[in-house]
Amino acid sequence: MLITKSAAELGRLIAAREASSVEVTTAFLDRIDELNPTLNAFLHVDREGALAAARAIDERIAAGEQMGPLAGVPIGVKDNFCTVDMPTTCGSRMLEGWVPPYDSTVVRRLREAGLVIVGKTNMDEFAMGSSTETSAFGPSRNPWDTDRIPGGSGGGSSAAVAAHLVPLALGSDTGGSIRQPAAVTGTVGIKPTYGGVSRYGVVAMASSLDQPGPCARTVTDAALLHEVIAGHDDMDATSLDLDHSGLVDAAATDDLTGLRVGIVDEFRGEGYDEGVMARFDEAVRRLEALGAEVVTISCPAFTYALPAYYLIQPAELSSNLARFDGMRYGLRAGDDGTRSAEEVMSLSREAGFGKEAKRRIIIGTYALSAGYADQYYGQAQKVRTLIIEDFRAAFERCDVLVSPTTPTTAFRIGERVADPMAMYMADLCTIPSNLAGNASASFPIGLSDDGLPVGLQVIAPTMEDTRLYRVGGALERDLEAEWGGSLLDRAPEAKGE
Ligand SMILES: NC(=O)C[C@H](N)C(=O)O
């Protein structure tokens, strides 16, 4: 069955002309038709466009052109990546129906590599949230249990990948938005080193934290996609010039001999599910059995990462979201010819933004305002430096750090909406990597006592993304040998049958 095959296998089949991209794309589009009404993973599906792109790839392959390993493979794109041929709403009324005049660099790279973009995936509004419940277009649902959240902000991408609606998807991670959804859906999520993947054309939320990255079902698939989207871009001032060619090879290593793994001491205790910790401890023992040396490392400043993030992130966001004023593009409300520009701006922002966006705009504006900036924003930036220092010291003693990706498994839809602090806790373990710019990933490591997926977070120093794939690849092969297949084979709704 085509939809259960990995992206790597699909790419091979298409290149060898054993399956056409049109056939593969049609299989996924049909799956989307069948399950998207339940999962709400896609906000927009472009059947015609996807089939036309697939046909073009098939023709090029038939003409003998050598294309990359993912040519002809379908992909879903989070709805904050600009696409010239599809709306880009960021899950917000503010941008409902807006079609950008250009492609983001990452989307351009997908097209150049021959990937087939089937549609845009649901997300929390402007990427604020851990559940997709702040999306103006309703929450996505977790294929493991449709009463539960698929994580956020990139829950549409994770649900789509977990339920075999697409073999691959794009995400963006500001505080955990790729890794936390991956953890709660049993998929692989990678946050590359900050600057490794271009942010050009990704609607900015918190520019010093945002980082695009891959969502996949297998570690090799994530590496293949990472190699396609990474690389220097003149259009992004923070883009790094790194060599990303070794990621796929790193995912093929089996042996972790000599790898020094540090357990983050701060990430356990109160608030962590027993089942999550049990799977985490087993995964660590597994890494040891594969040859790794394990130590426990204290990173005391990580305890302050969450409060620091919730000052820095809203501060940057309040500034970035100022552009949505109803004047240039996006929603314009109350413009009846009698109101001043200022009134129209205010009415547009009132109508266009949801509650969480307003909450963060207010907090961020306050944190940056004269008289308070030193007390809040300035202090948070100092904490950020301490976190970077903790990472530096930790990586003198180990090659990668590990923790649970998220303290609990997928919670129920509605359970945390009235309690922003409870919602923010979902990113407790993922935020330090964003504040410091590290490469970081979530890999599936089994099911908790409630039958829901658990993720292992692996953090590597900046620019050492290959280490993530080395650990993830070795772990995946070892676990799958024991399970007799992928974790997703056990998901009730996600089963490709
Ligand atoms: N965008 C992210 O990485 C999500 C994070 N949960 C936030 O709400 O800021």
Image (cartoon, rainbow, N blue to C red):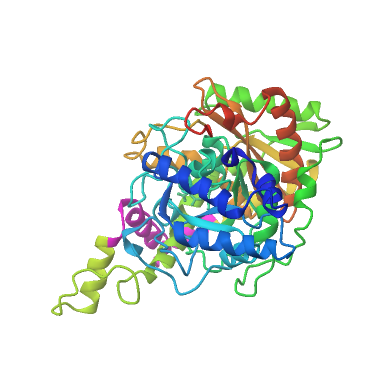
Majority secondary structure of magenta residues: helix
- Specify the quadrant of the image occupied by residue 360: bottom left
- Specify the quadrant of the image occupied by residue 457: top right
Extreme right residue here?
258
The image position of residue 155, as x and y in percent, is 47, 45
Q: How many marks?
A: 0
The image position of residue 445, as x and y in percent, is 63, 30
| Camera-side residue of 349 and 85 | 85
Q: Is residue 470 visible?
A: yes
| Camera-side residue of 76 and 175 | 76
Image quarter (top left, top right, bottom left or bottom right) of the N terminus: top right
Query: 215 above or below 369?
Result: above
Q: Residue at the location (19% across, 79% down)?
A: 340
Q: Residue at the location (50% across, 31% down)?
A: 408
Q: Residue at the location (76% across, 44% down)?
A: 251
The image position of residue 181, as x and y in percent, is 51, 42
Q: Is residue 170 visible?
A: no
| Camera-side residue of 483 and 473 | 483
362 falls in the magenta region: yes
The image position of residue 461, as x and y in percent, is 72, 50
Query: 176 above or below 335?
Result: above
Extreme left residue here?
338
172 falls in the magenta region: no
| Camera-side residue of 101 and 368 | 101
Q: Which residues are magenta?
A: 352-380
Q: Residue at the location (48% across, 66% down)?
A: 83
